[in-house]
Structures are given as structure tokens and as C-alpha cells.
């Protein structure tokens, strides 16, 4: 099945393994791409969590698959040092032959200019029309529509409402959030999305380096077990309710909330949260106990087993034929 996304990404199946901190290890990224979807590198996970120098990590992925691989660039302008590092990483990714980029937060103009000059494309994460307008003005080639059922930083709209809100911008739109079964996948493409981005479903795979406890928690959870906590990054993040979450709470304290309301202060507070949560999430990835945050979306309701990544890609691709889905 060809859609504007498959043409942009050069893949067979309109399916993305979304970039995940801390779960996007090289073996998982490569397995999804090798099966015909698009695995996406999350550079902070690749370097900080999984211990690879970026170029070496990209080359390891290349040793596992010759198929297209994507790259995620978080570009919020909260730190000059961080943006300088991300700028270098983008250059390395382009030098290593990557041509599909997903930008998150911030104005994607500078990334689009650089990637387009190399013949690549950029899709930008959005949760509503005002961010889509920034993406369009910045030169993005497509939109990743993050809905209210997503893991990580979820949006506030349903998949249906968000698609209708984004259609007028005239760019290809990828669904992100709440897609836990092949039937969910087919339904979203019937709706008019050109592809779907999955995260939680690919954590529950042998290729993902998450702990067995984390994977089993995804299998055991229902959509009602997903809650949103402000205490990870300063803005709501979807996680599985467990004993740690019950004890630690989900609301930022009064001082943190005051900091987060200020135009400049919010960047300082979010930087503090991020530095603290990076360590916590890194530890939670490997922990066999529920003593930490386990990020997941409401797609957990459709996940009942741990399956190889390639098998998931094949099942989702087969659903398009079974459901009679035609190209968007």
C-alpha cells in the first residue's frame, strides 16, 4: 500500500515505530525497518541510555538493516547547549544517510532547511491546529497528529477530531496514539490518516531492551490504568498506574506550578524536571520492580502478548488488505 508517507519515507508499510525515551534501542529500530515499517532513532536514548556514540550507534543499526531509518529531533529552545548538540546530531544523521526526520516541539524551520537541502523530509509532532500552523510555516512536509490516547506527551483531542482540525493544512497526517491492534491500525487509515505511529506496542517485543516487568505491565494493563503525571517533565505524561505512581502522585507542587506558569521560568523548571526524570526513566527501563515510571499509552488495552517486531509489522500490514483499506 502506497501513501504519501510511504513515498516520503521509502518504506513498504505505512507504520512507524515512534521514537521513545528510553526504549528506542538499535535492535528495535532496525527490526521494524527491516520488516518494512520505519524505525526511528531517538538520539538521547541511543547515546545516554544505550551507551552508543551517535555515529557508531547509527552504523550498528545500518549493520542490522539496509532499509530506511528515521531520526527524531526534539528542538525546544530551552538550552543553547542542547540545541548545539542536536544540530551536530542532525548533521551526523544526514552524513550517515538518514533522510526522514521527525521534529518535536519548537520551530522546525532550521531543521527543514537543512534536511531539505540534503533531499530529505521532515514531519512535525502536533497536538492541535496552532502547532500545525507553525509546522507549515516552518516548511514541514507532514504532521504527526498526537491524540489524547498517546503515550508520553499526549494531546487533548480524539483521533477523529484532530484529523478534521488538521486537514485544512493540506499536509499528510500520521496518527499517533491508542493504536494497539491491527484493526485499530486499519481503522485509522480508513479515517484518512496516511500512516500510524506506534510506541507502546513495540515496547512489548523481544527486541526492546525494556525489562520483562515493564513489558508484562503493558500486557496486563487496560486503558483505564493509564494516568497522566506532571512530575516527570512539567507537562502531563502518560504512564501506567502502579504503586510508585500511587505513592508519588501525579500533580506538580505549588512552587513548580508557579514556575511553570512563567514564560521564562517554565523553561528552567522543565529543564530541572527533565534532568531528574532522565535518570529516573533510565533506571525504570531495566527495573524488574514497579519502583518507577513506566510510560505507555491507552493502546495497552489491545496488547495481550509480547511479539516480535517483524510479526507486528506483518500483522498490521495484513489488516489493511483484510479491511479493504485503500491509499489515503
Image (cartoon, grey):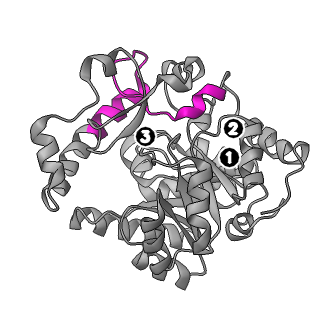
Question: Which residue carries the number 1 mark?
Answer: 32
Q: Is residue 255 left or right of residue 327?
A: left
Indicate which disc, 1 or 3, sits on the residue closer to the N terminus.
3
- Expressed as whole percent of the image width and height from the top left, the position of residue 35 reads 75, 47
The stretch of residues the image draws in magenta is 277-302
Residue at 71% x, 40% y: name it.
Answer: 184
Q: Are marks 1 and 2 in contact (CB under 8 Å)?
A: yes
Question: Which residue carries the number 3 mark?
Answer: 22
Question: Which residue carries the number 2 mark?
Answer: 309
- Expressed as whole percent of the image width and height from the top left, the position of residue 91 reads 44, 73
Number of numbered discs on residues = 3
Q: Residues within 10 Å of mark 1 (few under 14, many from 20)?
A: many
Asked if residue 95 is among those painted magenta in the image, a careful observer would answer no
Indicate which disc, 1 or 2, sits on the residue closer to the N terminus.
1
Query: Image height check: is 299 above or below 196?
Result: above
Q: Name the residue nearer the viewer: 275 or 165.
A: 165
Residue at 78% x, 52% y: name it.
Answer: 190
- Expressed as whole percent of the image width and height from the top left, the position of residue 135 reads 47, 72
Query: Image height check: is 203 above or below 83?
Result: above
From the image, which quarter does the C terminus lie in? bottom right
Amino acid at each position: 500500500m502506497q501513501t504519501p508517507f510511504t513515498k516520503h519515507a521509502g518504506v513498504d508499510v505505512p507504520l512507524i515505530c515512534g521514537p521513545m525515551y528510553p526504549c528506542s534501542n538499535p535492535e528495535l529500530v532496525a527490526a521494524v525497518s527491516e520488516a518494512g515499517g520505519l524505525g526511528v532513532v531517538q538520539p538521547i536514548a541511543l547515546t545516554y541510555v544505550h551507551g552508543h556514540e551517535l555515529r557508531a550507534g547509527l552504523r550498528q543499526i545500518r549493520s542490522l538493516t539496509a532499509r530506511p531509518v528515521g531520526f527524531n529531533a526534539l528542538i525546544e529552545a530551552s538550552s543553547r547547549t542542547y540545541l548545539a548538540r542536536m544540530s551536530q546530531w542532525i548533521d551526523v544523521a544526514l552524513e550517515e544517510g538518514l533522510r526522514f526526520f521527525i521534529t518535536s516541539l519548537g520551530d522546525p524551520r532550521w531543521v527543514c532547511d537543512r534536511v531539505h537541502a540534503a533531499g530529505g523530509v521532515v514531519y512535525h509532532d502536533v497536538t492541535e491546529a496552532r502547532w500545525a500552523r507553525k509546522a507549515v510555516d516552518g516548511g514541514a512536509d507532514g504532521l504527526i497528529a498526537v491524540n489524547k490516547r498517546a503515550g508520553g506527551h499526549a494531546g487533548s483531542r480524539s483521533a477523529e477530531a484532530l484529523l478534521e482540525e488538521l486537514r485544512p493544512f493540506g499536509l499528510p497526517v500520521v496518527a499517533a496514539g491508542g493504536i494497539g491492534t491491527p484493526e485499530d491500525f486499519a481503522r485509522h487509515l480508513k479515517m484518512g490518516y496516511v500512516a500510524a505511529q506506534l510506541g507502546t506496542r513495540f515496547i512489548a517485543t523481544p527486541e526492546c531492551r525494556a525489562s520483562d516487568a515493564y513489558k508484562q505491565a503493558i500486557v496486563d494493563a487496560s486503558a483505564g490504568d493509564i494516568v497522566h503525571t506532571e512530575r516527570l517533565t512539567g507537562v502531563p505524561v502518560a504512564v501506567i498506574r502502579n504503586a510508585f505512581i500511587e505513592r508519588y502522585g501525579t500533580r506538580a507542587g505549588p512552587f513548580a506550578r508557579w514556575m511553570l506558569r512563567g514564560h521564562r521560568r517554565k523553561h528552567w523548571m522543565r529543564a530541572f524536571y527533565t534532568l531528574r526524570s532522565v535518570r529516573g526513566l533510565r533506571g525504570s527501563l531495566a527495573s524488574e520492580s514497579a519502583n518507577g515510571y513506566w510510560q505507555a499509552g491507552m493502546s495497552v488495552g489491545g496488547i495481550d502478548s509480547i511479539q516480535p517486531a517483524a510479526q507486528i509489522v506483518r500483522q498490521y500490514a495484513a489488516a489493511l488488505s483484510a479491511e479493504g483499506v485503500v491509499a489515503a
